[in-house]
Image: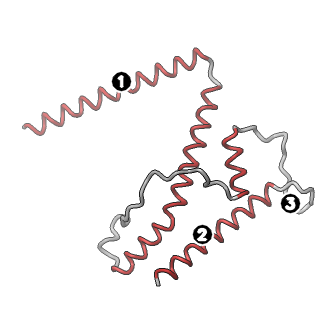
Amino acid sequence: MKDLFMKRVASALLIALLLGMVSSVYAQSDTGSTDAPKQNTTDTPKYGPVFQLETKDQASGEGFRGMKVEKKFTRRLPNFYREVISDSQRDKVYEIQAAYFGPVQMLTLRLDRLTAERDAQIEAVLTAEQKKKVEALRKESTARSAERRSANRKANSTADEN
């Protein structure tokens, strides 16, 4: 029964992935037919190579190649579920979580790559003087945070001693 359930989950995920790929290919196609929407290339901003790679990967289905999941799956029920579900429901919840774990991790890694590229491009807009000022502000903020944490620890340890 578990195998049948896993096959159904895998089939549903595959169908959703295929539908997403077909719709993105259709939206990106430039075949000249009147049915397909044309993209306005003059107004399209030129994003970096990682963004363009991610867009290509969505159409080709190669988006997960070369990515390494660093986190291991742990079975954990959502808050308040433990007291209301049966053992068979618990097993189903774990199966669903396991089925979604890999794709969610891959998408998280892709998001991290895109965010890093975006931040690098934003920083590239700044002049050298502006970069130095931003770095000084970051260090100042880090120092203030460290001071607050230290003060909170002292206050908590003093309260614990009383």
Q: Which residue is mark 2?
A: 13
Residue 90 position, x and y percent, is 37, 75
Tell me the SS state at disc 1.
Answer: helix
Q: Are marks 2 and 1 in contact (CB under 8 Å)?
A: no
Q: Nearer the viewer, residue 69 or 11?
A: 69
First of labels 3, 1 by sequence position: 3
Q: Quadrant of the C terminus?
A: top left
Q: Is residue 152 left or right of residue 75?
A: left
Report crowding for label 1: few under 14, some 14 to 19, many 20 or more residues within 10 A (C-alpha): few
Q: Which residue is mark 1?
A: 143
First of labels 2, 1 by sequence position: 2
Report crowding for label 3: few under 14, some 14 to 19, many 20 or more residues within 10 A (C-alpha): few
Q: Which residue is mark 3?
A: 36
* Residue at (84% x, 46% y) in the render: 40
Tell me the SS state at disc 3.
Answer: loop
Residue 116 position, x and y percent, is 57, 38
Viewer-nearest of labels 2 and 1? 2
Quadrant in the picture for residue 120: top right
Tell me the SS state at disc 2.
Answer: helix
Alpha carbon of mark 3 to alpha carbon of mark 1: how far? Answer: 55 Å
Residue type, label 2: Leu
Residue type, label 3: Ala
Alpha carbon of mark 2 to alpha carbon of mark 3: how far? Answer: 26 Å
Viewer-nearest of labels 2 and 3? 2
Residue 17 position, x and y percent, is 65, 65
* Residue at (46% x, 51% y) in the render: 70
Residue type, label 1: Ala
Q: Is residue 125 left or right of residue 84?
A: right
Residue projecting furthest to the left: 162
